[in-house]
């Protein structure tokens, strides 16, 4: 990076699509890896692209001082995960030294956006401008990080006070400290403008998901920023091509996902996507276009406490798995099937990932029920991303945390030397297009990663000593990347024509389905009328042949109430005809559902958005229920 070389590595013809590669004809442009800590401004300058909107994002888990060897009031001991037994020099864990090094790291990065996890907030004196009626002093940025706002021109985005107070009360009860440990985002004001958020009532539309025997996804709400998820909607402070294009905002989210439960991680990630969509939709309210539909543009970074290994539920959210499922679905409709070896590899990967997630061992593999629940959750993770009409990809960062292996922490064997282990826990996710598409229908406004920092694979010393250490002041190595954010473009005549053609095709498809059902119902009415006429004639003929009934004079003069008149039960022939119709209608609806499934299978994300705009409901609801 010192010589500002090109930040692209171009591979010649590649037989398969590579994750995070940008397809260019028959070559793959891969983002360049830079040494960890390289000033991000120097990387941007090396691109020499003054006419592009580039954004640099840094993610740091700070290792809150509250989480370093605290006494847990519930046990009276330090929890194993907070003991840092591999750190022999106590000065490395000293907060007075660590906070200065953390601040230096942030300043030296020169990032546009800094996403922080485990930022410890302290109670501050109330200001006259505070409207909060709470008697608690507000939780705000600590003094050590305040220079980022006062001197280096960053805006700080924090969760609301009620969320901070909630975690502070928990920390006071468990760890004896009335302080909040939370996520936060710092945005460089000179480069990026923070857009206003929607009112709370606009931002609370829930997502409803399955709940089978309490194993399915629970109902969640997009809500607002929280201690584990902070999102911000940005646009450039000065758009470089204002006269020629429309810049569509981008949402940056800082997350700290659950450390023990894969289901909770999937829920948190889904909530993050939903909030990103709400933030962007709020900014697009003034758009009168009925054809132009802009995709979700979001970057999600942070400590995700998951490695995205094959067979895991988290990896099921990524583009590579989504494309694989799509190809399998296409093959499923033909005679081509996956090879037995491929199916065996997938099954083994699922067992391995499930075993790791449940903290089991090879001697205690997951049960059949646990594996079934795991596969169900993988399918739900896949569906949750599909429901948002988006693809997620991951920058291929390596391991970011190094400590004693889990089995070594739990053992009481002090004679055997403990081995260090590394994990890929911190990630940079971003929305992207589907490179499998032959045209550009899903490529509008896609985010493009251009460069990123190396991780522990380039630091063998830290892999031996563990983190934190003399070079890294946290137990997680920071990660960073540079993205290109193309301006949102007005739809071209060709795109408008394609969108209109798709809507016309959809209307024709729905009309055909509706006409077939209406025709079947009309045929039933005709047959029902004919049968009723035949039955009426039979009744008249039977009445003419029967002798007149004796008149009961005692009941003369009394009129029967209209509502009390009993209808004759339908004939056996009528009941049989209706049963046949219901069976026919059921078969017809089943065939139409299969035709809708075939149609949706070939749709790109843009077409799914058009479908949702057309029917006014989520595309999956249209798929399951059909048009209104």
Image (tube, helix red, strand yellow):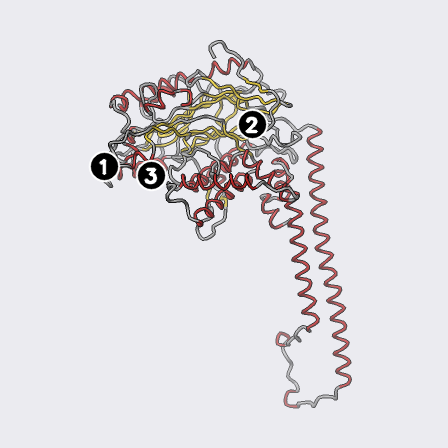
> Residue 572, relative to residue 39: is it above or below?
below
Quickly name the residue at label 3: 166
Cα distance in 3D space between marks 2 and 1: 47 Å
- Residue 473 placement: quadrant: top left
Quickly name the residue at label 1: 77
> Residue 334, relative to residue 546: is it above or below?
above
Percent x, y of residue 226: 40, 36
Do residues under tags 1 and 3 come within 8 Å of each other at their CB atoms?
no
Quickly name the residue at label 2: 18
Q: Which mark is residue 419?
A: none
Do residues under tags 3 and 2 come within 8 Å of each other at their CB atoms?
no
Q: Is residue 245 visible?
A: no
Cα distance in 3D space between marks 1 and 3: 24 Å
Percent x, y of residue 395: 49, 27
Cα distance in 3D space between marks 3 and 2: 43 Å
Q: Is residue 112 left or right of residue 86?
A: right
């Amino acid at each position: 990076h010192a010589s500002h070389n090109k930040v692209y590595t171009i591979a010649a013809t590649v037989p398969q699509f590579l994750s995070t590669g940008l397809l260019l004809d028959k070559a793959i442009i891969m983002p360049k890896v830079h040494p960890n800590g390289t000033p991000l401004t120097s990387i941007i300058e090396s691109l020499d692209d003054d006419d592009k909107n580039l954004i640099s994002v840094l993610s740091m888990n700070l290792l809150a001082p509250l989480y370093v060897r605290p006494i847990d009031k519930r046990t009276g001991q330090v929890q194993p995960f907070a003991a840092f037994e591999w750190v022999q020099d106590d000065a490395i864990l000293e907060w007075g030294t660590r906070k200065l090094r953390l601040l230096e790291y942030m300043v030296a990065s020169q990032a546009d956006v800094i996403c922080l996890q485990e930022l410890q907030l302290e109670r501050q004196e109330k200001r006259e401008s505070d409207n909060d009626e709470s008697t608690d002093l507000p939780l705000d940025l600590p003094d050590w990080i305040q220079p980022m706002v006062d001197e280096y021109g960053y805006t700080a985005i924090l969760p609301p006070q009620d969320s901070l107070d909630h975690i502070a009360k928990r920390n006071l009860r468990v760890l004896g400290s009335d302080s909040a440990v939370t996520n936060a985002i710092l945005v460089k004001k000179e480069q990026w403008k923070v857009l206003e958020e929607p009112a709370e009532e606009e931002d609370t539309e829930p997502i409803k998901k399955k709940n089978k025997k309490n194993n399915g996804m629970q109902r969640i709400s997009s809500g607002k920023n929280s201690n584990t998820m902070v999102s911000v909607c940005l646009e450039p402070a000065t758009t470089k091509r204002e006269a020629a294009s429309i810049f569509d905002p981008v949402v940056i989210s800082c997350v700290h996902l659950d450390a023990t439960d894969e289901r909770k991680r999937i829920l948190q990630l889904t909530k993050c996507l939903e909030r990103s969509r709400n933030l962007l939709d709020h900014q697009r309210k003034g758009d009168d276009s009925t054809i132009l539909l802009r995709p979700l543009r979001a970057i999600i970074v942070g400590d995700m406490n998951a490695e995205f290994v094959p067979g895991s539920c988290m990896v099921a959210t990524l583009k590579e798995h989504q494309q694989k499922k799509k190809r399998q679905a296409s093959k499923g409709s033909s005679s081509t099937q996956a090879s037995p070896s491929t199916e065996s590899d997938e099954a083994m990967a699922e067992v391995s990932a499930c075993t790791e997630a449940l903290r089991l061992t090879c001697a205690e593999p997951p049960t059949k029920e646990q594996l079934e629940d795991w596969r169900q959750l993988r399918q739900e993770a896949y569906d949750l991303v599909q429901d948002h009409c988006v693809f997620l990809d991951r920058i291929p960062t390596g391991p970011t945390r190094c400590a004693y292996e889990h089995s070594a922490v739990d053992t009481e064997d002090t004679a055997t030397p403990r081995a260090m282990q590394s994990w890929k826990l911190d990630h940079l996710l971003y929305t992207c297009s589907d490179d499998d598409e032959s045209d550009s229908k899903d490529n509008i406004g896609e985010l493009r990663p251009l460069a990123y920092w190396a991780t522990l694979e380039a630091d063998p010393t830290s892999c031996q000593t563990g983190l934190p250490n003399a070079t890294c002041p946290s137990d997680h190595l920071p990660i960073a990347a540079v993205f290109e954010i193309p301006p949102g473009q007005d739809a071209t005549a060709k795109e408008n024509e394609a969108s209109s053609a798709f809507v016309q095709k959809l209307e024709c498809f729905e009309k055909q389905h509706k006409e077939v059902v209406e025709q079947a119902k009309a045929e039933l009415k005709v047959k029902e009328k004919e049968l009723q006429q035949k039955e009426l004639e039979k009744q008249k003929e039977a009445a003419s042949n029967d002798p007149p009934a004796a008149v009961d004079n005692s009941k003369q003069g009394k009129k029967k109430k209209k509502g009390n008149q009993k209808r004759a039960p339908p004939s056996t022939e009528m009941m049989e005809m209706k049963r046949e119709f219901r069976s026919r209608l059921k078969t017809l609806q089943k065939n139409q559902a299969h035709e809708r499934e075939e149609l949706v299978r070939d749709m790109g994300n843009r077409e799914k958005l058009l479908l949702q705009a057309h029917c006014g409901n989520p595309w999956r609801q249209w798929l399951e229920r059909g048009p209104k």
